[in-house]
Image: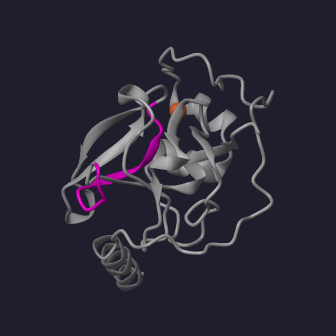
Amino acid sequence: MIRSATIHLLLFVTIMASCQASPRMNAPKPDNIMSNATNPAKPYYSRTDTTRLTLSDEEWKKVLSPDLYAVARHGETERAFTGKYWNYEGLGTYYCSACGNALFRSDAKFASTCGWPSFFETMRPKSVIYRDDTTYGMVRTEVLCGRCDAHLGHLFDDGPPPTGKRFCMNSISLEFEGDKK
Ligand code: FE
């Protein structure tokens, strides 16, 4: 059990460490990316209200899917190359899937080899907040939603110009809506 966990951790660290920007790939364009601007099943969800949300863990557990709850509220990481946005190239906006807060524009997204959607800047300075993360024997910067504190991913310094930053996000923490034509 411990050996299996160690192998898994080593694999994760290796992938994260080798994750660098690369030329944009000819990625498949999924046709199942749905707009989800309003959803009555998400009572705290809003794309216009930027008031900070301070819900209990118990309340979040009620309103989020089990997979999103594990990532957003307990910092789990989805497996690389499994999320719906890691190689998605649609033009539009990425919102926090837990609360609807606007996070990233597609023109700040770049193709990376890491298997998670990666951006070089946020949509607004207050779109996200940061926290030191020293888990797994690493010193990293955790990125959380600026409205609801949901765990989104981590920030690295190996991104492309103009910022040199790489916001390495979990797809499940994001919700994409395409630009209106
Ligand atoms: Fe949020």
- Judge whether residue 12 is colored magenta: no
Q: Which residues are magenta?
A: 149-162
Residue 21 image offset from top left, x and y in percent? 36, 68
Q: Nearest the camera: 77 or 1?
A: 77
Q: Nearest the camera: 19 or 180?
A: 180
Q: Quadrant of the N terminus?
A: bottom left
Q: Residue at x 62, y 62 (%)?
A: 88
Left or right of 21: which side holds 97?
right
Residue 9 image offset from top left, x and y in percent? 35, 75
Left or right of 86: which side holds 34?
right
- Judge whether residue 155 is colored magenta: yes
Classify residue 146 by image quadrant. Answer: top left
Position of 147 relative to 166 (above/below)? above
Residue 51 image offset from top left, x and y in percent? 50, 14
Q: Residue at x 20, y 64 (%)?
A: 137
Left or right of 35: which side holds 112?
left
Residue 172 image offset from top left, x and y in percent? 59, 53
Q: Residue at x 68, y 72 (%)?
A: 28
Q: Quadrant of the C terminus?
A: top right
